Image: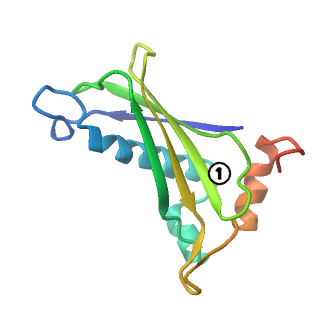
């Protein structure tokens, strides 16, 4: 299992009239977590695109448990629970407040996509090599 964490402070413009993080902004927090997780593996989205790989979102599920509030420092935990197989990769996201309370959790499924052929493709070997140490031999 691979886990990465990043921190985001809830900005005023991201909140609704009640001072709660607007529900649509959780997907943006998931994205920040994914980008930073990939960076921890030694890549950026830009580098993957330069390698001929795009990663569009195919599915997003979110569960709202408690509100994130204006000026809260949120910990975004991004988890790959299994080694990706085939063209899909699934990121699990968990958002915690400063007291360690779980506020939100979600799963984002992306696909590896080759824009030249306009078809799904498998995970780049370089990314597989970076992820392999986090998974046992049975999963990867």
| Quarter holding residue 21 | top left
Residue on which the image places disc 1:
41
Is 9 left or right of 34, judged from the image as shown? left
Q: Nearer the viewer, residue 4 or 55?
A: 55
Residue lying at the far left of the rendered structure: 17
Is 136 left or right of 93, judged from the image as shown? right
Asked if 96 appears above or below 93 in the picture, the reply is above
**Rendered residue at 22%/36% (across/down):** 11
In this rendering, the count of numbered labels is 1
Asked if 30 appears above or below 123 in the picture, the reply is above
Asked if 133 appears above or below 115 in the picture, the reply is above
Give the x, y percent position of residue 2: 68, 40
Residue lying at the far top of the rendered structure: 99
**Rendered residue at 47%/59% (across/down):** 57
Picture quarter with the N terminus: top right
Is 127 left or right of 34, judged from the image as shown? right
| Quarter holding residue 119 | bottom right
Residue lying at the far right of the rendered structure: 137
**Rendered residue at 70%/60% (across/down):** 127
Asked if 87 appears above or below 23 in the picture, the reply is below
């Amino acid at each position: 299992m691979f886990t990465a964490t990043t921190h985001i402070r809830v900005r005023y413009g991201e909140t609704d009239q009640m001072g709660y993080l607007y529900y649509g902004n959780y997907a943006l927090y998931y994205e920040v977590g994914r980008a930073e997780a990939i960076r921890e593996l030694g890549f950026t989205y830009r580098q993957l695109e330069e390698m001929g790989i795009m990663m569009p979102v195919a599915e997003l599920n979110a569960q709202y448990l408690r509100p994130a509030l204006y000026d809260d420092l949120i910990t975004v935990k991004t988890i790959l629970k299994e080694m990706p197989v085939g063209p899909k990769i699934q990121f699990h996201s968990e958002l915690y407040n400063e007291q360690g309370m779980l506020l939100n959790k979600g799963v984002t499924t992306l696909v590896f996509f080759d824009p030249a052929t306009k078809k799904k493709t498998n995970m780049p070997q370089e990314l597989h090599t970076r992820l392999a140490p986090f998974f046992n031999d049975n999963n990867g």
